[in-house]
Amino acid sequence: MKLKYRLRPYVQGIPKLFLYKFLCSMLLGLCSYGISTLSDILLSSANRVSVSSGDFGFVFMTWQGYLLIVCAVITVLLYIAADVNALILFCDKLLNGEDPSMLRCLRDGVVKLKKYANPRGLFVILFLTLLTPLLGLSFSISLTESLYIPRFISSVIEGSPLYFSGLMIVYILIYLLGFAYRFIIHGAVIDGQNMKEAGVSSRKIIRRNLKSFILEMLRFWLSLIAVFIVIAAVAFALFFVVNTFLADNELSLFLNAFLSLFFTISLGVFQMLSGPFYIMKLTVLYRTYQSEGEWQCKKRATKRRYTVVLAVCAMLAGCAFLSFVSAHFFDEIFPPSSDKEIVAHRAGGNEAPENTVSGISAAYSLGAAGSEIDIQRTADGKYIINHDDTFFRVAGVDKKPSEMTLEEIKRLSIQGEPVATFEEALEASRNKVKLFTELKGETADKQMADDAVRIIRERGMEKQTVLISLKYDILEYVEQEYPEIETGYLAFFSFGKIQNMPFDYLALEEEIATDEAIEAIHNNGKMVMIWTANEDDDIKESLLSDADMIITDEVRLSKTIEAELKKRTPLQRILDSTGLSLNLF
């Protein structure tokens, strides 16, 4: 293919692909809203407000749960039909010089779902919806593209050579599998092959054209990176000019806000089109390889170019209006700082041996508002602080707390310090930091909840301690039996109205701590915690959110970033509010 054929389909396809993604997103959003409303009704009939990481067992034990599974399956299939099947058909028609109908492609995409009604097809669905996003591979449906391995799990994997090696092996195997079957859906959707035939065809195509395929995909990804670099370079240059030659006045605020909005929208459009461009690239290669080089992209007569001009003008006008408003109400829209309480993970985070008395003292000395600890029950009914199931990682002893007495545990050493009891942790935190106490491990039960409350009461520290857990039922028990004790629920996934959960704090894993979720929780009078933010960008993003506090291992770094945020220039405040400082520079 000549260079013009490499560029032509993407340039010609931009208006159509953008319109397809925009309208398709709205249509899928409406369908998802309907299914979500039905799911809320089912949850309500089961006396539930949500399905979350610590409360999903009922899904497999009630008729409402089974219907929720059906709703989830229908939702996934709708997204497969629109984001994969219909988009492939849409791109194929564009490449063949046609003017495709979105609704017709969607209808055909739904019809093509029957191709997945077999074991191979089900695995393809699993691959697209779960494996690809979890492992950060190239393509997934928009419904699950933000899926991730929770940080508290990934940190364990990264900290263990055995687990990390196993994950890398799985990653390589899945990547190779996806590489060999890269054209399986194209074969099924475009040529009507069954999944077995399409799989065999895909392997043959890749084997015959391995070198060409690798080079073409490399060119494609490098082109996308180049476009991103150009956007970043132009943005940097314009911001530099404005802030070098203009004083800090209303005009500079207007221009900075305008440029930020313009490049935010541009970046959003670029990200929106990257998926369709990837599908188009695969479709070009599939058609070319299937025809052994005889197929060529057909030039499509472009129509209604004025619609693109009108869309750009409307975007510029919208940016100008919002920028004018922003310049007049600058401090209200771009607040100078957003104070958050910082809670040290595992007592003192990385500032001291984990889950120790010295960790609590270190957190306090650095200005942390709280410390998070993990308690487990010993063989003789006492409570000590330890995160893992055993003491192997921190003390070199491969035994569980429940297999040892307190006397035996006290002989262990964590980097020269003894294992602390719950009582010792409470005394270390008294009048210093709030103690977020996680009911942890296999001994986390109602007895632990009863004993923890008794120990807290004996020391008169009800107002200085919060009981938290990943286990919904235990916290629900605490709320019912001990309403004066504050509780906090740890969630790393949630569906439904999490804001209606009966707890004082809702701790959201950083990826699900969206602005919408935080606002809904606040509107219900509850506090929001983000866990566990450790990287610079993650800490900054969490501190800039509307959450009330963050849990982190990096207390010192968090305090440093917090201080830096209070010194931001007007431009930095604009960039941070629009997300450009994290996404572009």
Image (cartoon, helix red, strand yellow):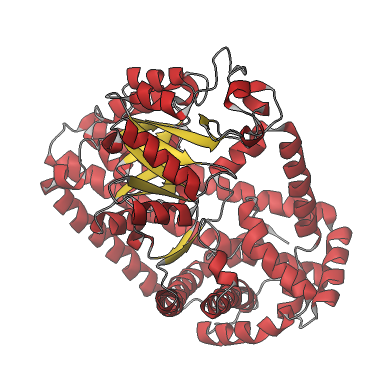
Residue visible at 67% across and 82% down in the picture: 113
Q: Quadrant of residue 242?
A: top left
Work out which quarter of the rendered image holds the N terminus and state it.
Answer: bottom right
Q: For residue 582, say whether it is visible.
A: no
How many marks can you see?
Answer: 0
Residue visible at 65% across and 30% down in the picture: 404
Q: Residue furthest front?
A: 380
Q: Quadrant of residue 465?
A: top left
Q: Position of residue 11 (x, y in %)?
A: 53, 64
Please give left or right for residue 250 compared with residue 309 in the image: left
Using the image, determine if residue 228 lies above or below residue 17: above
Q: Position of residue 118 (x, y in %)?
A: 77, 79
Please give left or right for residue 325 compared with residue 207 in the image: left
Using the image, determine if residue 351 lies above or below residue 314: above
Please give left or right for residue 558 compared with residue 9 in the image: left
Q: Residue furthest top?
A: 416
Q: Position of residue 456 (x, y in %)?
A: 35, 35
Please give left or right for residue 254 compared with residue 232 in the image: left
Q: For residue 152, say whether it is visible.
A: yes
Nearer to me, 36 or 381: 381
Residue visible at 36% across and 44% down in the picture: 529
Using the image, determine if residue 409 lies above or below residue 376: above
Nearer to me, 208 or 397: 397
Work out which quarter of the rendered image holds the C terminus and state it.
Answer: top left
Q: Quadrant of residue 464?
A: top left
Using the image, determine if residue 202 lies above or below residue 214: below
Nearer to me, 244 or 471: 471
